[in-house]
Amino acid sequence: MRASESGAGDLTVETVAELGEFGLVERITDALATTPAVIVGAGDDAAEVKAVGSVVVSTDLLVDQGHFRRDWSTAHEVGRKAAASNLSDLNAMGARPTALTLCLALPGDLPVSWVDEMVRGFVEECRSVGAAVVGGDVAASDVLTIAVTALGHADQTICRDGAESGQQVAVAGALGLSGAGFAALSRGFRSPRAAVQAHRVPEPPYGAGMAAARAGATAMIDVSDGLMGDLGHIARASEVQIDLNTGLIPLEPAVVTVAEALGRHPLSFVLSGGEDYAIVATFPAHAELPEGFTRIGTVVAVPAGDRPRVMVDGEPWDETPGYEHFR
Amino acid sequence: MRASESGAGDLTVETVAELGEFGLVERITDALATTPAVIVGAGDDAAEVKAVGSVVVSTDLLVDQGHFRRDWSTAHEVGRKAAASNLSDLNAMGARPTALTLCLALPGDLPVSWVDEMVRGFVEECRSVGAAVVGGDVAASDVLTIAVTALGHADQTICRDGAESGQQVAVAGALGLSGAGFAALSRGFRSPRAAVQAHRVPEPPYGAGMAAARAGATAMIDVSDGLMGDLGHIARASEVQIDLNTGLIPLEPAVVTVAEALGRHPLSFVLSGGEDYAIVATFPAHAELPEGFTRIGTVVAVPAGDRPRVMVDGEPWDETPGYEHFR
């Protein structure tokens, strides 16, 4: 390892190409995390993790410039976000995460220190929910790409197709903060901190999905593409309409600040902003909502001649329903 | 969908950018495969798959130009290979595959028909071993990248660290064919067909790993980076030396053909060629080898002053030990 030309003692200019694949794999493997659920950990052809009856599995891809920007986020933040976006999917099924894998496609000139920090952030986020990191893969690529798979356990998974007319719609976690942070960063701002930091490192309401499952949630999803878009998935899968009551939706102060600065309505961030990884679920009409959930609307039957969709205060909403890649 | 400008009726020039993320996800989801092991399939936040006691998990990354070339291989072949390389890792643990996930990072100008064919090849390879495809993710990227995770079940996983002095070393599946095919393709040849086709679509000896586990295999790995390199992993993990007897190693006729044409020794392909996904395992000295396995060497103690490594006919081998990314 060579010292940085800048003279900073803890930085190195060693690149992944200089270290090579096998050195990189060894270095990453040493940094991973195990738990009592791990039977065979990283370093073999495959890992083995305890499972009771079934395993819940989710996978996500993060691409440099599309899902994160190295000039906006530290490597540690990128690692935490890569884990969080997958852990959120398990949260949305009512599952407890047990183990994750991490694949990295890396440009050869990427500093090894960036990989170290990214892996450290990834492992820390997984550890915070008691999940192990049991392996992965590395390869060379001109585009930094991160692929994550998360495994977990659920006594009862909650899918998207169980919402019924008359039920409550409720949310846990922040809405619009990440989208407001993205809007601020896009215009060169670094504040308000609550919004910018939420975009860099989301804080999903871990455990809310399991609590919702125990409370009888009938359908559930995480808000990764925007509340309107993600509730739209529930509406279509359940063949219902969802009517949001904007008077009930909590507005984060930082969202209001960004909206005022940019001349936008705060609800545009709340309804269309993605990557907050809030949990939104439907519950029976008279169910007591679990701690952390706020009622924001009602499931209604699809009126004759209409289609499953999400209404806002009884009216159609005409803004773009969420972020879509390739668009 | 628009007709191809070439006028070929079954081709389209529609690109993934024109179809968009949600259209692409829907299209891929419709093409996936389910089995009775799948409790919740593709289309929700996560999938749920039956598991008994534990789940074996492996993940792999394939990058355009590094792991495959679109001018050498059809989309269908790339899909089959992407599945095969992961299914092989489960094979090497003695596991039966149950379900796979598929992440695709795609350039916007890629024809949707390429994705269709790739997914079809992927699903066919999974179906051939009874495994479902339960979900995935898509994202935009300038570099076509495929990330696969495979789940499986093993009554008893076979790791790399169980080889002991005096035991037999045996292999199932072809050795050197893919490497010889790569060498031929690199020089612009399209033959011999057996070698070229093995490089495009490997045919791992599916089931050999489970058979080896039942026969008492003590250590096992798949030959993805080359026999010397992969046996080196067993030697180091088990703290032994492995002595290969080249007189026992089967030589594929196509490997001999390529070696003669290029003025190389056929053993260089057999010992250093990767991506055949043969299974190599160690067995107790007097164990009866399962069908399909050929004895190729012996596990020996590390001589005083030496280190764990792989010898060839009692001598050190000085060629490069296998393919390494970033090199």
Image: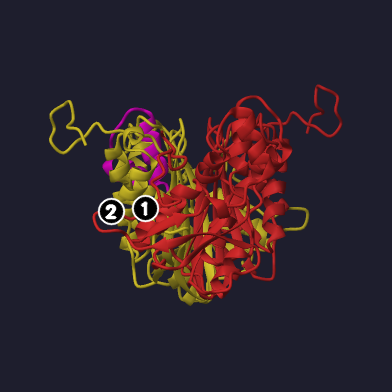
Chain colours: A red, B yellow
Magenta: predominant secondary structure element?
helix
> Where residue B185 sits: x, y (%)?
35, 33
Q: Is residue A251 above or below residue A64?
A: below
Q: Is residue A146 above or below residue B159?
A: above
Instruction: Give the quarter of the image for residue B110.
Output: top left
B188 falls in the magenta region: yes
Q: Chain of mark 1?
A: A
Q: Quadrant of the N terminus of chain A?
A: top right
A322 falls in the magenta region: no
Marks 1 and 2, how far apart in space?
9 Å
Q: Which residues are magenta?
A: B174-202
Tell me the residue that label 1 is attached to.
A309
Dot 1 amino acid type: Arg
The front one of A6 and B296 is: A6
Disc 1 + disc 2, Cβ < 8 Å: yes
Q: Residues within 10 Å of mark 2 (few under 14, many from 20)?
A: few
> Where residue A162 sits: x, y (%)?
41, 68
Rendered image: mark on residue A306: 2
Horizontal side of B303 relative to A204 (left or right) equals: right
